[in-house]
């Protein structure tokens, strides 16, 4: 079984709780997992985005520590997650390739992840899938230069959008083809794989975009059939960096079908 959820952002006049409720009304189902983000890590669950999920759903939670973030802050947050019994997967500084070198990220991860892993909170990495497909000779290759090392990562996540592919003459490469490399990498190391962000822009061709969304479902079902289900799948229902809200009926229907298909045990 794969949890299918979303990242949501409020529109004008909405609070975070309102935005979550609006998405649940739109999709006709409770949101079982939410992708959420903070900048500097808070010292407790109540100090950041996790407060909207406790007692309601699982969190796939990213924050961006620095080498100066107090270890006591990380330990306090990990302890509070455990004390509250919150189901939470922690991502240390998602999409690091655009912000730092591989060496810098590995140092940051190895410093920031242990307080959570010691407390029993799963911790992993999240890379843009394009950076996973770069040749190992490229210093931005996530799998070669940003991998923290064996036994230090509880899951691998990717963010994926077919930006620039859906044109009048072109279709987006289906999900199973575009993720082949990261799937092989994760499977060879026995590490679960999750889809932390994905989406299509409302300005793209509707039918071609729908076809790509349905390839996500096909990919997830194939993973499950081989005994390696995706850990979670989170649609990016947001207008940050594009307009990815599920505004077209075809896209909403494809999302609902993904939720139904991947929920099967």
Image (cartoon, rainbow, N blue to C red):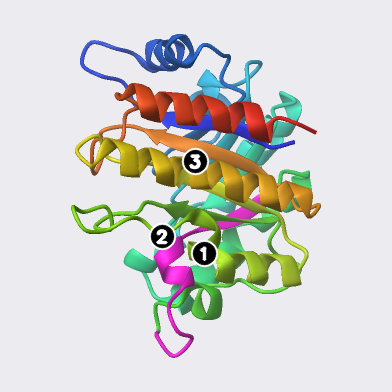
Outermost residue toward the front? 169
Q: Position of residue 94 (x, y in %)?
A: 46, 54
Q: Quadrant of the C terminus?
A: top right
Q: Which residues make up the magenta segment?
A: 123-138
Q: CA distance from mark 3 to mark 2?
A: 12 Å
Residue 167 appears in the picture as rendered:
yes
**Is 167 or 238 nearer to us in this picture?**
167
Relative placement, left or right, of 147 versus 11 is: right
Identify the residue shown where x is 29% and y is 12%.
14
Callout 3 crowding tier (Cα within 10 Å): few <14, some 14–19, many ≥20:
many
Disc 2: which residue? 173
Q: Are marks 1 and 2 in contact (CB under 8 Å)?
A: yes
Secondary structure, mark 3, is helix
Q: Which mark is residue 177?
A: 1
**Is 142 or 28 nearer to us in this picture?**
28
Outermost residue toward the bottom? 137
Q: Position of residue 197 (x, y in %)?
A: 45, 44
Secondary structure, mark 2, is loop
Q: Earlier in the sequence, mark 3 or mark 2?
A: 2
Q: Position of residue 185 (x, y in %)?
A: 65, 71
Quarter-of-image position of residue 109: bottom right
Relative placement, left or right, of 224 versus 238 is: right
Callout 2 crowding tier (Cα within 10 Å): few <14, some 14–19, many ≥20:
some
Quarter-of-image position of residue 263: top right
Identify the residue shown where x is 43% and y is 17%.
23
Give the vertical position of 64 relative to 10 (above or below).
below
Q: Earlier in the sequence, mark 3 or mark 1?
A: 1
Q: Which mark is residue 161?
A: none
Relative placement, left or right, of 71 versus 198 is: right
Relative placement, left or right, of 172 versus 81 is: left
Disc 3: which residue? 214
Q: Quadrant of the N terminus?
A: top right
């Amino acid at each position: 079984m794969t949890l299918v959820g979303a990242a949501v952002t409020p529109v004008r006049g909405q609070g975070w709780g309102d935005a979550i409720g609006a998405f649940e009304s739109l999709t006709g189902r409770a949101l079982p997992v939410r992708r959420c983000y903070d900048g500097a890590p808070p010292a407790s669950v109540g100090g950041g985005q996790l407060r909207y999920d406790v007692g309601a759903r699982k969190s796939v939670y990213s924050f961006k520590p620095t080498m100066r973030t107090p270890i006591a802050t990380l330990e306090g947050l990990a302890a509070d997650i455990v004390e509250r019994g919150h189901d939470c997967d922690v991502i240390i500084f998602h999409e690091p390739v655009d912000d730092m070198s591989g060496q810098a990220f590995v140092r940051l991860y190895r410093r920031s992840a242990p307080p959570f892993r010691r407390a029993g909170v799963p911790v992993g990495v999240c890379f843009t899938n394009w950076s996973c497909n770069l040749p190992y000779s490229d210093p931005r290759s996530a799998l070669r230069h940003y991998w923290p090392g064996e036994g230090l990562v509880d899951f691998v996540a990717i963010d994926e959008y077919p930006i620039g592919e859906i044109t009048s003459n072109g279709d987006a490469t289906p999900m199973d083809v575009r993720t082949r490399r990261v799937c092989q990498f994760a499977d060879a190391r026995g590490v679960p794989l999750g889809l932390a962000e994905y989406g299509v822009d409302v300005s793209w061709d509707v039918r071609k975009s729908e076809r790509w969304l349905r390839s996500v479902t096909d990919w997830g079902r194939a993973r499950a059939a081989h005994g390696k289900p995706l850990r979670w799948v989170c649609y990016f229902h947001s207008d940050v960096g594009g307009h990815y809200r599920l505004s077209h009926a075809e896209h909403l229907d494809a999302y609902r079908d993904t939720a139904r298909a991947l929920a099967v045990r």
